[in-house]
Image: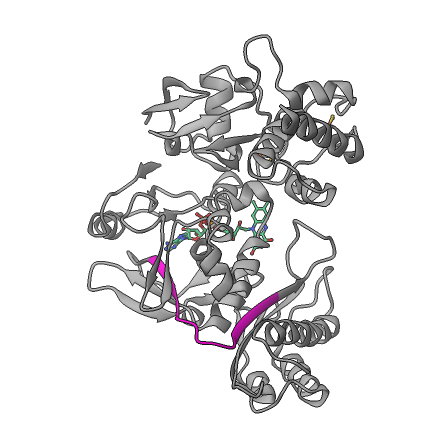
Amino acid sequence: MRYEKPQTVAEAARLLSAEKGVARILAGGTDMLVQMKSGMVEPDLLVDIKALPGTRTIVKEAGGFRIGAGVSGAQLSEDADLKAAWPGVVEAANLIGSTQVQGRCTMVGNLCNASPAADSVPALVAAGAKVRVAGRGAGRDVAVEEIPAGPGKTKLKKGEFITSVFLPARGARCADAYLRFIPRTEMDIAVASAAVNLSLDEKGVIKDARVALGAVAPTVVLCEPAAKAIIGTRLDDAALEKLAAACSAAAKPIDDKRGSVEYRKDVVGVLAKRAARIAYTRAGGQK
Amino acid sequence: MSVTVSTTVNGDSVDFVCAPDETLLDALRGRLGLTGAKEGCGTGDCGACSVTLNGRLVCSCLVLAVEAEGQEIATVEGMAAGETLHPLQRAFIDHAALQCGICTPGILVAAKALLEKTPDPSDEEVRYWLAGNLCRCTGYDKIVRAVQAAAAEMRRA
Ligand SMILES: Cc1cc2nc3c(=O)[nH]c(=O)nc-3n(C[C@H](O)[C@H](O)[C@H](O)COP(=O)(O)OP(=O)(O)OC[C@H]3O[C@@H](n4cnc5c(N)ncnc54)[C@H](O)[C@@H]3O)c2cc1C
Ligand code: FES
Ligand code: FES
C-alpha cells in the first residue's frame, strides 16, 4: 500500500484517477482502519485528505457553514455558532462512537462509508446539506441524500471525493433535532433513527419541514409525506400521529437480532415524533 | 515498502521507519518501545490504546503511524514528571482503581484529557467521557472516584 497526503485538490484527484488498483480516501480512519485490518478492503493507494486546503476548518459562508471533510466530531462540538444554528446536526455527529472516536471521525466519512445506520446522515439530509464533490473536472455541489447508493456504496465516480459539506443559513424560528434508538446508552449502532428540521412563522405554525430516517432502509430516507403531515400545523397531537404514521409507512427495514421489521417501523415513528417536539421547542414554538 | 516518520512524542523529537499501513499503536510499541498504550481490541472499541494527537484524545489503533508525521503525540509515559507521579496516577493507586492494569494507561490518558477540558466534571460527565474505555476487572465506580479525587486535588493546586 502507498500512503499519500496531497496538498492540493488537483493533486489528490490526479492520484486517485491515475491509480490502477484499489484507491481509498482516508479522513478520520475510524471505519477505514477497521476495514483494512479485517481484510475487508485492501487499498493499493490511500489518499489522506487532511492536508488539503479547508479540510480542517469550519468557515462561515453565505450565512451558513462550510465544514471541511476532515473536521472531527470533537471540533464540531466546540463550535458554539454551529451548535446554535444546527443543534441536531451536531448532536447526531457527536453520537458517533466514544470520545476517542470523536477525536477523529468526520461527517463526510460517515456519509461515504455508507452504512444505513450512519448517525450524522439523517441530520444532514433533514438540514438540506450539500457536499462539494471534487474530481478531475470542475467541482459540483450535490445534496447529501444523492450520495449513498446502498449499504457500503456511494454514487461517487472513480477519482471523485468530497472536500466539504455546507449547511445553509438559518433564519429566525428554525431548529433541528436528531434521535436514535440503541439498546445501550453509548457506543452502539442505531436500530432506527429520525431527524427533523423545521421553521415556524410568528404564530408558531410550521412553515417548512424536512424529515429524514436512518437505519430503516438500504439508504437514508428523506420522508416528504412526514414533512407534509406537520407543515401548516402547530404540532398538535393529530399532526404528530400523522407524522409517525408517514414515517412508519416509509420505513423498509431489515429483520435482524437488533430489531424486527415491525418493531423498527414502530420505533422510527416514535423517534420522529419526539425529534419533532424537540425541534419545535428549540425553534421557539409553544403549545 | 517503508516510510520514515518524524514526529514528537511526549515533547521529544523522534524518527522511525515503518510500513505505510502500520498503526500508530504498533509503531509506539514496536518501533519506539513505548509499551504503555495497549492493544485490547484493535478496532476502536476498548480505549486501551488511547493517546493524544495534537491534544485530541484518539485510539492509536485507528491512526496510521505515517499520520503522525509532523504532529504531536502524548502517551501515558509522559504523564509523570520524572519520579513524581501525576495526581491521576497517584489517585488510581490510592483508590485501588486498577487490578490487572491493562486498561489503566488508556484511562489515565483519557482522564487527563477530560480534566484539561473540564476541571470539575460531574460523575455522569466522567462516565460518558470514559465510555470508550473498557475495564474488565476493577469496576467503574472506583475509577470514577479516583478521577474525581485527582480532579479535586488538581483544582486545589
Ligand atoms: C468504536 C466505534 C464506534 C462507532 N460508532 C458509530 C456510531 O455510533 N454511529 C455511526 O454512525 N458510526 C459509528 N462508527 C463508525 C465511524 O466512526 C463513522 O462512520 C465515522 O463518521 C467515519 O468517519 P471517518 O472520518 O473516520 O471515516 P474514514 O474511516 O476515514 O472513511 C470512511 C469511508 O469513507 C470514505 N471517505 C472518507 N472521507 C471521504 C471523502 N472526503 N470523500 C470520499 N470518500 C471519503 C473512505 O474512503 C472510507 O471508505 C463507529 C466506529 C468505531 C470504531
Ligand atoms: S486497542 Fe484501540 S480501542 Fe481497543
Ligand atoms: S484493571 Fe483489568 S481491565 Fe481494567
Give the image location of residue A32, x and y in percent: 46, 45
Give the image location of residue A35, x and y in percent: 50, 45
| Quadrant where the image shows the N terminus of chain A | top left
Q: Report the residue that reaches farthest toward the front.
A: B156
Q: Is residue A210 above or below residue B98?
A: below
User: Is residue A256 toward the left or the right of residue A112 in the image?
Assistant: right
Decide which of A135, A63 is in the foreground and name it.
Answer: A63
Magenta span covers which residues?
Answer: A163-178
Give the image location of residue A215, x and y in percent: 60, 66
Q: Quadrant of residue A263?
A: bottom right
Decide which of A133, B147 is in the foreground and name it.
Answer: B147
Q: Quadrant of residue A169?
A: bottom left
Q: Quadrant of residue B157?
A: top right
| Quadrant where the image shows the C terminus of chain A | bottom right
Decide which of A38, B100 is in the foreground and name it.
Answer: B100
> Is residue B110 within the magenta segment?
no
User: Is residue B93 toward the left or the right of residue A108 in the image?
Assistant: right
> Is residue A170 within the magenta segment?
yes
Report whether residue A151 is seen.
Answer: no
Could you tell me which residue is drawn at 75 percent across and 23 percent down?
B98
Q: Report the residue that reaches farthest toward the top.
A: B83
Could you tell me which residue is drawn at 78 percent across and 29 percent down?
B137
Q: Is residue A30 above or below residue A206?
A: above
